[in-house]
Image: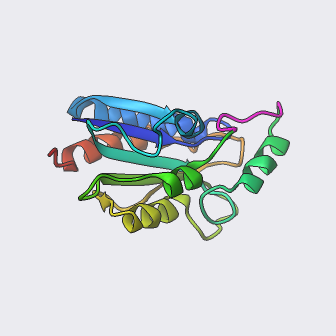
Amino acid sequence: MSTVVVYESMYGSTKAIAEAVADGLAAHGPVRLAEVSALAATPGSKQLPADVDLVVLGGPTHAFSMSRASTRQDAVKDSPNGAVISAGKGLREWIEALRLPTGGLQFAAFDTKVVKPNLPGSAAKAADKAMRALGGRPIAKPRTFKVHGKADGLVDGEVEAARAWGRELGAAHVRV
């Protein structure tokens, strides 16, 4: 059995968190890291591979929730080089198309969110709610990791916190 960490990232902070979470999970078994727009473009992406027994989802908080096509377009416009990491479909669309196996699947959700201004909303909470609606079984509360600004990088200590959270998820995960 294995874990897949599916992430959406605009400027790299969410990707760095996803990599750290995957690193923390690796002590507990095989882990695959998948950027969501690349995953969404692959045949059969509406279902996870049969050997996956835990999925960890992460994305940036945009407009108080998971990104939308319009907020991703805004991110491209705001990007210093006119490009983003997740240029295709986002986490929201991937979850909407996802089909979980009978009995559901264990999952956890995280997001990245700017420190200032401290606005309401959370991509992780929205992803958690969407996965529960599909029959997913959460193994942890949604988790937020802080960034200085849209493209200004992670707050000090967040990568280490993500790695530790990955270890906690691995320990909490009940393999079937």
Residue at horizontal 30 percent and vertical 52 percent from the top = 101
Q: Is residue 83 left or right of residue 3?
A: right
The N terminus, quarter of image: top left
In this picture, is 40 found above or below 72?
Answer: above
Residue 157 appears in the rendering? no
Residue 148, position in %: x, y? 66, 48
Q: Main secondary structure of the magenta part?
A: loop
Instruction: Give the residues drawn in magenta, as a range.
Output: 81-87
Q: Residue 72 in the image: state x and y as whole percent.
A: 73, 49
Q: Nearer the viewer, residue 111 or 54?
A: 54
Q: Residue 92's image quarter?
A: bottom right
Q: Nearer the viewer, residue 73 or 103?
A: 103
* Side of 168 where 71 appears, left or right: right
Q: Nearer the viewer, residue 120 or 75?
A: 75
On screen, residue 156 versus residue 99, left or right, reads: right
Residue 59 vertical placement versus 127 (above, below): above
